[in-house]
């Protein structure tokens, strides 16, 4: 908004729209990762909280049985009806409007209405209530979103009875995810089955596909839910997975090859390769060419040692290949990729001029000529402008074990250590005040009631009465007092906990730095010691404290977080559960003095706790947990925020031509845009002399119009924007493609090349493109005869 806009008079239309929005009720949707995640319980809790605030809350659906809190709220009787053997109910909208409460609680947003009802769906009833100024808090399962329901059905074996359109979550004023780990869901279902005197194993066998275990099935559902919310319902997970399935067998593994020479950009290329491999759930391989006739310089030896350490750290495979002539790199690299079934080569852009390419040979041009069935990803060097981002990757690899091989003493001891190790659960949040400690104490009391020996090792309530009230019957371990610079400070008494030997200890603030003089420098080191002693630990952490995300958090918030937790510690966790809270709720808690002291509220709200910061941190936390579930790398939402110390906006630009390769390029673009949570633009840029009858936007060529409609439909389904540009001459194609990409502020361009026998006609413009597009990442998707057949 321009500075003068605040002083302009609003038009009658704008005023009317604002007044209508003020009159409209608010819609809050509680999204569960799967059935049994506790959405009804949370709905009761939400209603109870609003009632305590003095709001008039009523039930629109049936009141849950055997729940005193739910029974204490008034209910407007629903209209019962049956569909076959299924007993259903509709909201009595007329009575609700007559009653005119502040909030209506609706359990199950996706349910349809009876055939003779005035409106077809419960969703339409809810919208009617909203228009009449009545707010609604409703529940749904994530797999009831029509964008992911097909994936839930095909992959996880869950067939939702009803679905909701994608715009439902987009139109909601507040959407919160109720995250529960697969282990907790299984435990709850086992308890329920025992209460109902039903065999859980038998029920499970009938209900789910034989090819997917219960734990895997629930993990898939959980990941779908996490990614759906993390993407802020701008992308379609259903279509994303569906398109991945069409591209090849689900068991095919991506193999990423990084060309890393002993120079300044070697580590950048390796880490970008790590990022790609993690996002594609693939294996990572590093390749370096070395001239056996020339000794390495001291600088090259330094880079070699650093590269070795980095490769070991990320768990990649590394190989040095002798090379006597620079002109042979392209051929050797292509052959290596083909022999080792690599699906993608990651390397840097060339810095050579045209004359240098002619004298010394061009690696880029050589690869464009020879590579087949392997995509080329050229990395732009942004380290000077934006810094280098480090991303977490799972290093643990499962090695095959011979069934009849006798365990060695060392292997038995290592195995026994793993069995003796305590269970580790981490509760993660996007920011302070989301309710991590509150949830940890709730879980501790629940387990205490089940007979588990639970103690509080360290608790930081920060003066929050609601949090302190959740301690309940949990016993405390007295803190250790340490003198430091004339002050008496307190830390967790790890020695006392080890002596007490509880089954579970609750430890708040995992990233905390201990007082100098403590046995361990960091609190997570105390936690590791407890785990190794066979004591289970439940702990809390905020996403900004994850070490590998430190630079990203600084770009987002402008704040460098000093206390961090290594990613390796997070990988030790057996469970990671997210507490999802909307940014507006966090700000309200801050304003009410529930997070920081009153004298710090204004400063916090104007700095770290700004709404854009909280939105970014929330999305970051959602994606971190989603990638933990599916062993994928952290993916980013690159939405346009504010200028300054915000993270860089990612825009994926796919340049296609009207041929059979276009849909594949669109899917490639969607995969990357979805992982990056980026905007996706697909532009058709025809070459005039190759396609004379398809020369412009207003062509009447029927095959082209059909192709354009199909490609646009695919792009829109995948959440992108499609357009057709006027045709250009072959010599102008590269300049026009880069101009359009720059116009869209693209950070990555995706183009395709045909099979090798048809590639010669494309080489001139591809060489020009790679020469003038060095300021952005470029993915070249190659085609081959086998795929085309």
Image (tube, rainbow, N blue to C red):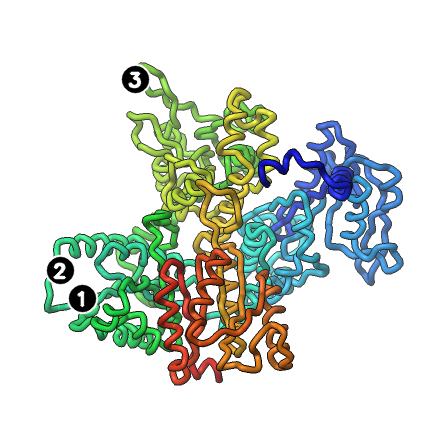
Q: Which mark is residue 485?
A: 3
Q: Is residue 76 visible?
A: yes
Determine whether label 2 and label 1 are within 8 Å by CB. Answer: yes
Residues 318 and 756: in front is 756
Nearest to the eye among marks 3 and 2: give it: 2
User: Is 607 drawn above or below residue 580 in the view shown?
Assistant: above
Q: CA distance from mark 3 to mark 2?
A: 51 Å
Camera-side residue: 736 or 561?
736
In the image, what residue occupies the spot 63% across and 65% down? 150
Residue linked to disc 1: 290
Badge 3: few (under 14), some or many (20 or more) residues near its Cα, within 10 Å?
A: few
Precedes in sequence: disc 2 or disc 1: 1
Q: Position of residue 440 (x, y in %)?
A: 52, 36
Q: Nearer the viewer, residue 211 or 467?
A: 467
Q: Residues within 10 Å of mark 1 (few under 14, many from 20)?
A: some
Of discs 1 and 3, which sits in the foreground?
1
Q: Position of residue 369 (x, y in %)?
A: 34, 77
**Among the 4 quarters of the image, the one containing residue 241:** bottom right
Above-or-below relation of 622 to 502: below
Q: Secondary structure at mark 1?
A: strand
Residue 646 left/right relative to 398: right
Residues at marks 2 and 1, CA–CA distance in whole angstroms:
9 Å
Instruction: Please tell me which residue is depicted at 28% across the width and 55% down the height of the picture.
Output: 267
Residue 764: image location, x then y, percent: 37, 76
Q: Which disc, if any, is residue 296?
A: 2
At horizontal 62% and vertical 56% (from top left) the residue drawn is 200
Residue 71, image quadrant: top right
Find the distance from the CA under tag 1 to the CA under tag 3.
55 Å
Taking the image as shown, residue 112 lies to the left or right of residue 477, namely right
Give whichever of discs 3 and 2 has the lower sequence position.
2
């Amino acid at each position: 908004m321009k500075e003068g806009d605040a002083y302009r008079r609003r038009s009658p239309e704008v005023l009317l729209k604002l007044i209508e929005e003020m009159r409209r009720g608010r819609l809050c949707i509680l999204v569960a990762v799967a059935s049994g995640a506790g959405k009804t319980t949370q709905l009761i809790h939400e209603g109870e909280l609003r009632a305590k605030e003095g709001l008039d809350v009523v039930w629109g659906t049936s009141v849950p049985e055997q729940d005193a809190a739910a029974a204490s709220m008034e209910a407007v009787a629903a209209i019962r009806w049956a569909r076959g053997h299924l007993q259903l109910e509709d909201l009595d909208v007329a009575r609700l409007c007559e009653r005119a409460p502040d909030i209506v609680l609706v359990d199950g947003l996706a349910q349809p209405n009876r055939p003779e009802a005035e409106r077809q769906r419960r969703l339409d009833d809810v919208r009617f209530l909203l228009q009449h100024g009545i707010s609604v808090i409703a529940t749904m399962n994530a797999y009831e979103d029509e964008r992911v329901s097909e994936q839930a059905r095909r992959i996880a074996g869950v067939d939702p009875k009803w679905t909701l359109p994608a715009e439902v979550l987009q139109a909601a004023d507040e959407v919160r995810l109720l995250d529960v780990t697969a282990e907790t869901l299984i435990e709850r279902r086992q308890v329920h089955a025992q209460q109902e005197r039903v065999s859980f194993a038998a029920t499970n066998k009938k209900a789910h596909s034989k090819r997917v275990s219960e734990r895997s099935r629930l993990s898939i559902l959980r990941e779908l839910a996490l990614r759906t919310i993390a993407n802020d319902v701008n992308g379609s997970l259903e279509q994303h997975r569906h398109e991945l399935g069409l591209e090849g067998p689900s068991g095919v593994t991506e193999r990423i090859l990084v060309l890393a020479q002993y120079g300044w950009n070697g580590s950048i290329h390796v880490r970008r390769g790590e990022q790609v491999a993690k996002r594609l759930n693939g294996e990572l391989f590093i390749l370096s060419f070395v001239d056996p006739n020339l000794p390495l310089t001291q600088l090259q030896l330094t880079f070699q040692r650093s590269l070795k350490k980095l490769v070991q750290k990320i768990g990649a495979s590394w190989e040095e290949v002798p090379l006597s002539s620079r002109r042979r790199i392209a051929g050797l690299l292509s052959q290596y990729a083909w022999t080792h079934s690599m699906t993608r080569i990651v390397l840097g852009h060339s810095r050579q001029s045209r004359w240098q390419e002619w004298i010394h040979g061009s690696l880029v041009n050589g690869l464009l000529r020879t590579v087949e069935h392997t995509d080329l990803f050229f990395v732009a060097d942004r380290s000077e402008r934006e810094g280098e981002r480090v991303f977490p990757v799972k290093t643990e690899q499962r090695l095959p074990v011979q069934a009849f091989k006798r365990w060695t003493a060392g292997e038995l001891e290592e195995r026994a250590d793993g069995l003796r190790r305590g269970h580790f659960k981490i509760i993660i949040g996007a920011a302070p005040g989301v309710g991590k400690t509150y949830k940890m104490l709730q879980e501790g009391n629940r387990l205490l009631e089940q007979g588990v020996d639970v103690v509080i090792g360290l608790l930081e309530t920060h003066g929050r009465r609601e949090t302190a009230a959740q301690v309940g019957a949990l016993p405390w371990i007295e803190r250790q007092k340490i003198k430091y610079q004339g002050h008496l400070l307190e830390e967790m008494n790890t020695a006392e906990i080890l002596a007490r030997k509880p089954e579970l200890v609750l430890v708040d603030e995992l990233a905390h730095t201990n007082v100098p003089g403590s046995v361990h420098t960091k609190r997570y080191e105390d936690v590791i010691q407890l785990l190794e002693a066979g004591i289970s630990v439940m702990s809390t952490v905020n996403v900004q404290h994850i070490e590998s995300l430190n630079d990203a958090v600084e770009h987002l918030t402008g704040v460098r977080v000093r206390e961090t937790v290594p990613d390796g510690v997070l990988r030790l966790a057996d469970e990671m559960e997210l507490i999802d809270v909307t940014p507006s709720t966090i700000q309200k808690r801050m304003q009410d003095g529930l997070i920081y002291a009153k004298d710090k509220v204004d400063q916090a709200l104007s700095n770290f706790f700004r709404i854009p910061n909280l939105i970014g941190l929330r999305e970051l936390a959602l994606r971190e947990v989603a990638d933990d579930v599916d062993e994928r790398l952290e993916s980013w939402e690159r939405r346009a925020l504010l200028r300054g110390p915000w993270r860089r906006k990612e825009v994926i630009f796919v340049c296609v031509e009207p041929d059979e390769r276009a849909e594949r390029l669109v899917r490639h673009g969607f995969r990357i845009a979805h992982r990056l949570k980026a905007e996706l633009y697909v532009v058709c840029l025809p070459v005039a002399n190759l396609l004379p009858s398809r020369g412009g936007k207003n062509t009447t060529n029927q095959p082209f119009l059909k192709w354009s409609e199909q490609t646009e439909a695919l792009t829109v389904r995948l959440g992108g924007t499609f357009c057709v540009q006027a045709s250009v001459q072959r010599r102008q194609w590269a300049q026009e493609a880069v101009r359009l990409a720059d116009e869209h502020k693209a950070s990555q361009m995706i183009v395709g090349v045909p099979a090798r026998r048809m590639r010669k006609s494309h080489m001139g413009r591809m060489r020009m493109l790679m020469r003038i597009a060095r300021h952005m990442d470029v993915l070249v998707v190659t085609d081959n005869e086998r795929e085309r057949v």
